[in-house]
Amino acid sequence: MGVKMNITKNKQNQITTVSLEGRIDTLSAPELEGYLLPLLRKDNPVIVVDLAKVDYISSAGLRTFLIARKLVETVEGKLILQNMNQRVKQVFDITGFTPMFEVR
């Protein structure tokens, strides 16, 4: 059984920061999707996802970010991924996902 992922949100001005902690895998990706997608509206033009405390991401997690990216484009918003550790960044690099996102 995987470790539960924790999600916290902080909104300042027009920027909503979503901080994730734990694993983004088959079990937690639907939870993340259910949390993240409703935020991607016109009144939330910039979403920053802080991945500093994420130690693992699976293809299910990548899929969630891909769905979020497509949705954010429809509302002319911005999805920024920041603070990836080396392991998570490597998954994004190997799968070719890195150029699809603004990564800080």
Image (cartoon, rainbow, N blue to C red):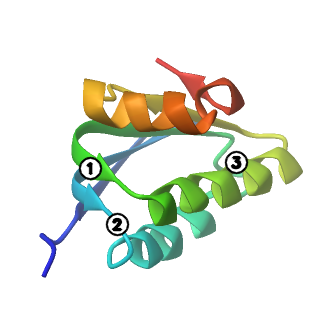
For this rendering, which residue is in front, 43 or 36?
36
Q: Earlier in the sequence, mark 2 or mark 3?
A: 2
Q: Find residue 76 and report its image quarter.
A: top right
Secondary structure of residue under mark 2: loop
Percent across and percent down for residue 55 are: 20, 45
Q: Is residue 36 left or right of residue 50?
A: right
Secondary structure of residue under mark 1: strand
Give the residue at mark 3. Answer: 69
Mark yes or no: residue 42 visible.
no
Which dot marks residue 56?
1
Give the residue at mark 2. Answer: 25
Marks 2 and 3, how far apart at CA:
18 Å
Percent across and percent down for residue 100 are: 70, 32
Labels 2 and 1 touching (C-beta < 8 A): yes
Task: Tell me the amino acid under the disc marked 2.
Answer: Asp
The quarter of the picture where the N terminus appears is bottom left
Q: Is residue 69 depicted above or below 25 in this figure?
A: above
